[in-house]
Amino acid sequence: MQNDHSIGVVFTPREWAKFAIEEFSIFNDWMNGSSIFDPTMGSGDLLLALVEYGIEQGVSLDQLPIKNLFGNELKNNNYQKAIERFKEEFGVDLTTNFTNYDLLTLKSAKYDIIFGNPPWINFSDLPTHYKEEIKEKFHSYDLVENAQKLLLGGSRIDLAALIIQRSINDFLSLNGNAYFFIPLSLLLNDGAHSSFRKYKIGTTSYALKCVYDFGRKKIFKDVATRYGLVQFKRDESTTYPIDYRQFEDNLWNRYQGKPLININDPLSIYGLNKTPPLDDFEPIELPKHSTPRQGINTCGANSVFFFNSFVSIDQHTCLVNGKDILPLKFVHPLLTASNFKEKKPIARKWVLLPYTSLGKPLNAETLATTPLLKSYLDKHKSKLQSRKGTMIGSWIKRGIWWSLLGVGSYNFASYKIIWEAYGKITFRPLLMNSKWQVNQALQCYIPLNTKSEAKAVLLKLKDPKIEEYLLSMKMEGTMNWAQPGKIKKLIKFND
């Protein structure tokens, strides 16, 4: 990548750099001879903060071991600015200590301490040519099983994870400490970062020692994601529970954190001297076909498949959006947030599913025998064929351009246990019949065949320990509140 590009840049306010310096005694270690390296230094704020902190402690500039500060920066103008700032603020020339490379291509060296703020950006959001350049690195640094998986799956793994792995493996001395400001998705989200949470690169292990979660405190301007400050130590294994501190009501409250079910799961956070959530919890036994699922994904065609009004004309047809007549059997009520506040849900939205009851998209021959449906879909053919994405693209290439994602036999199960999975702070599952459908990631569900089975599972899902478990992962109010992966871990499949 050219050195004039910025990728996922998040600059660190100097006051919070000093907070890290004080909390982790970085200044004392530096004064006692430790070398310090910022692998993605931007314009040098973390290293400048060390010098400024020392002067504020009454140490004169000539007593500070400034020549033990090292940094690297990808973007050329930031690299030049870092050099200029050291000259202007402290009269020191660190040109020989600073390098202007992509860290992923920089020659390895060893430092006692790494102090950094890596770029925060998902692999899927990187420029296409840069993805090609670095995809193999995610594999060689043990973050994915193979490089091709990144491109095919559009992985949501963060570049910060790769920078941390590379920094610890190739730039940190034996038993050295690394301190990073990071997006907390690396520690708290399911899915893409489970490999990162092995805290291992080849034969090199490192331990997660401590986390400072900034909570609602806004220290990075215009950054919406959760973030924090962490300590890693090379050549140790993580010992759980770890020390976890969260900024709440202008105080750092202390908690402890550990993965509850699988060792590479996200951290669950709970009080000091408290029993971990799910203690003595018995897994819910279900058949494999009752796997928790997300809802229907139109791949950007909500205006074609979702309707705001519905009138039954006769036992075979209905009028949707006040203008289109469709076969009744392909139009289903779609859950909205309001339905979770009602004793008897009232449909406010509807969805078109051009599928068989076995969850297969109608083939061209069957579609031709339903002229109302065919005419409606043909009217929107151009929009449906122009949808983007690997998975929907495969259906379009096969000529089944009216397909959706998230539709299968499970959509037509006799019963569904449904819950709100996005942006909530409570877990309140409902039992619904087969007609009701679920909207993308907003809600999730478990499909079940009999009412007795559904009632039994609903009772188990209402166990307060489940909500406690979800709250422990600190994802309340976010898109990752209660997605299927979290609930799936509570289930033991019996076939």
Image: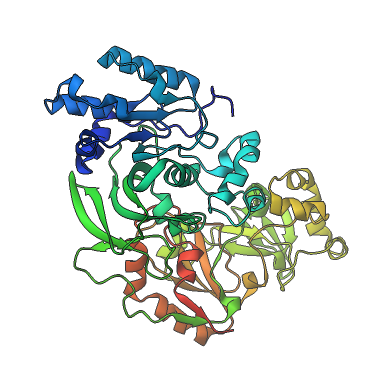
**Which residue lies at the image location 31% right of the left edge and 30% below the top edge?**
46
Image position, residue 459 (x, y; %): 40, 80
Vertical order, 367 against 454 (above or below):
above
Kindly indicate the quadrant of the structure image that contains residue 81: top left
User: From this viewpoint, is residue 226 visible?
Assistant: no
On the rendered structure, is 430 left or right of 379? Answer: left
**Which residue lies at the image location 60% right of the left edge and 54% below the top edge?**
309
Along the line of sight, the residue nearer the viewer: 329 or 277: 277
Image position, residue 260 (x, y; %): 37, 69
Vertical order, 301 against 426 (above or below):
above
On the rendered structure, is 312 left or right of 280? Answer: right
Q: How are the residues colored?
A: rainbow
On the rendered structure, is 159 left or right of 58? Answer: right
Along the line of sight, the residue nearer the viewer: 228 or 408: 228
Residue furthest to the left in view is 58
Along the line of sight, the residue nearer the viewer: 194 or 93: 93
Kindly indicate the quadrant of the structure image that contains residue 129: top right
Vertical order, 156 against 91 (above or below):
below
Image position, residue 416 (x, y; %): 54, 73
**Which residue lies at the image location 53% right of the left edge and 62% below the top edge?**
335
Image position, residue 178 (x, y; %): 34, 44
Along the line of sight, the residue nearer the viewer: 492 or 65: 65
| Count of labels in the image | 0
**Quadrant of the frame with the C terminus:** bottom right
User: From this viewpoint, is residue 389 visible?
Assistant: yes
**Quadrant of the frame with the N terminus:** top right
